[in-house]
Amino acid sequence: MENIFGSFRQLRRSRIQGRGGGKPEDDRGKVLFGVLAFMMSESLVFMSFITAYIGLRLSTSPWQPPGVSGPKLSSETIITSVVLLSSSLVIYLAERALKRRKVNRFRWLWATTTAMGAYFLYGEVKDWLSEDFSLSTGAIGGTFYIITGFHGLHVFVGMLLQTIMLFRSFIRGNYDKGHYGVTAVSWFWHFVDAIWVIVFSIFFLWR
């Protein structure tokens, strides 16, 4: 009888911990490894776009068609960029607050990160509307809107993931056994910010 109850308890633990009877820390490793692999694949996509841009710019003369001044480095562009990059610090502080069981502080900081991302996207759309070229304006238009748009899509996805994690924080006991989902989203957000440093440099600093 004890063997039967022992087997039942073991089966119940396996269902709680995941298929195959893995430990919770194994699930954490799988999730974080999956996110890391995804970011590496996305890095290759971004690098292919950026390499194509550099190659086209170096081989196309003139790079800017007549009457086109290229992407404008306005004060608003600088501000939105600073806001986005600063959000990496905010999301780090949010994750740190959660590790210390300060859930309310985590929520405020986490929501602030999402708001900073939204502000960046708002500024990016304003930049698009103020440029004197369009997607169809030669190589300069195609590369600018595709690369910045692809990056903006990643910012939007990061905001959606942050919103999901924020709602999950209101589930009682959700983070009692770990918060690797929050860590994964935080990693992705740092990745998005790092990519923007490169994108900003090639479009707004390279003259």
Image (cartoon, rainbow, N blue to C red):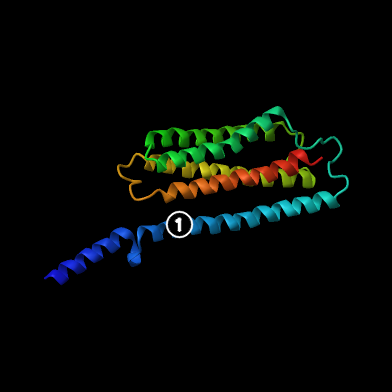
Task: Give the farthest residue toward the left.
Answer: 1
Establish if 55 lies above or below 89.
Answer: below
Amino acid at circle 1:
Val
The residue nearer to you, when weighing 176 against 100, is 100
Residue 56, percent from left and from top: 80, 52
Left or right of 69? Residue 13 is: left
Query: Which residue sits at x=40%, y=61%?
Result: 26
Report which quarter residue 14 is drawn in: bottom left
Q: Which residue is mark 1?
A: 31
Left or right of 9? Residue 141 is: right
Helix, strand or loop at mark 1: helix
Residue 119, percent from left and from top: 57, 32
Tell me the quadrant of the picture where the C terminus can be found.
Answer: top right
Can see residue 188?
A: yes
Establish if 25 lies above or below 123.
Answer: below
Mark 1, other Cα within 10 Å: few <14 / some 14–19 / many ≥20 = some
Can see residue 135?
A: no
